[in-house]
Amino acid sequence: MEELRNIHHSAQEGRLEEALLRRVLDFARHRPFHAFHSLRWRLLLGLLPVNVEAGRHFHEWEECTRAGIRDWNEMNDNLQQRLVATDSAVRPVEKKGLVSKDEFSSFSSSSSCPDDGESRTVENPLLPGVGSLYALRYCVDTIRATAQKDLDRLHWDFPLFEKSTTRKALMDLIVNYCLRHDYEYKQGMHEIAAFIFYLNHTDSALLEEISKSPEEADKALIDGFGRICPINGVMAMTFSLFENVMGGSGLRLYEWYHSSEEYARDGIATASHRTQRELLAEFDPVLHHQMNVVYEIEGTSYLIRWLRLLYLREFSIPQCADLWDVFLSERFLARHDDYSLNNSIVTMLAASMLFYVKQDLMVGCIDALKRLMKYPPVEDVGTLVEMTIMQQDPKKNGIGRYFTPPERHELFGSKTPPPMEETSALATSSALLSPIEVMNQQGTILASIIARLELLWMPSSDAMSNDAGHAAETHARTIEELKKVRDVLLFSNGSKTHYA
């Protein structure tokens, strides 16, 4: 309810855009799953206008919702009518081929023809004409056969996905999308569609449940949003969101599914290589060297799944909803400027994820591959989001301007890391370790030192203002510790180079 009240009041006051972005990107406060993410996404993707006249937002949003439901029903009904038709198409066969976008969108013109002997022809199912029933049937059967295998493997632990009606709805969505845009079905599209469907259904069902509660005082507000997120419009809203997430006016995810060339400029292979070879180097040159030179791991081996599915298999459903809030906020701020997924926060997040599990990735190639194929659970994605936004927008000219990071103690720990051991002890223990183990050990120490430096420059709000002396002492000790780590790394393998 708090989410709906916030949207309603900010729209009434004519400040919806600012309020929406700040709320969506606020990771300091508790982020409940039932935050009406689907409503947020429709606003961020322009399916519902953000700049509306004060007091008219409900009216305009209801009109957009009704139009979306009407368009979906017409498109889907048109397809179902053509599939159940028993008569062959009554039109001359011009050439062999499959159904085109124009033919699909104009059922009336392709299903009616003058009833005279000269213009009628019998369709040959082995040589179907463009726009014919046989061509359409072949296209649909091909899409269904491929998509059904993936839908059968969709085992999300939600009762909604155990229903046959849900799987049929997802199949209808996929078929209509592929036919409308003249695309083949690609593996992974079903998970994107299922995720959007689940969020839409959850939000609409919650609104319907709240509207029936006798304790709810603000019935007018609930009824208003109930007409914007109706339960009978879930399929229509899901299709619109899916189409925009995939399409050019949204995230342009189609570029990662339907690139004509393997290494197209905006293709998934290019994005994978750029993430591991360029973006990771910005985070950590040592890890970059380990992954690309020592291990020679191909980024496409794991990043294609991460990126194409927008991390649906790496994080929980609520965490993915929060991540998509961030992705779509960046797209919203890009407006009509050139937007590329390959240069977006989506790819930068992947580099952050690699840096986040650096210690796991430094222990050996096999263990690193296992970690990449099964990313560990993350308690708070806000930490990853902060790392990513700091790297993507360091000057806070874009998304960083609206972002509120998690509480500082959550990111760096509430206590200063303990002092390190003396140099002699470090050198002695390091001498017994392999080079990889030495690097991993010293990397852990460096991470501790960096955290301490962060605390010095970004103190918590309750830090004492007269701690300048303590800060200077800690700073001096930290410099000494960095020199100790340097000495271990330089001299543990017999290096003769000396530094002051």
Image: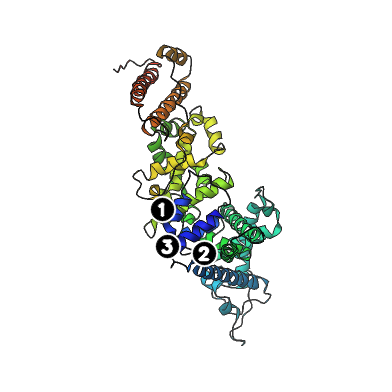
Q: Quadrant of the C terminus?
A: top left
Q: Which residue is mark 1?
A: 340
- Is residue 395 visible from the viewing direction of this image? yes
Image disc number at residue 143: none
Q: Where is residue 288? Give x, y as percent.
A: 42, 34
From this view, report whether residue 56 is shown above or below residue 472. below
| SS label for mark 1 | loop
> Badge 1, how many Cα within 10 Å: few under 14, some, many 20+?
some
Q: Are marks 3 and 1 in contact (CB under 8 Å)?
A: no
Residue 128 seen anywhere in this rendered image of the structure: no
Q: Earlier in the sequence, mark 1 or mark 2?
A: 2
The residue that mark 3 highlights is 14
Residue 140 location, quadrant: bottom right
Q: Residue at x 40, y 14 (%)?
A: 423
* Real-space CA distance between mark 3 and mark 1, rounded to the nearest whole angstrom: 30 Å
According to the picture, the residue beneath numbered tag 2 turns out to be 181
Say whether disc 3 or disc 1 marks the residue closer to the N-terminus: 3
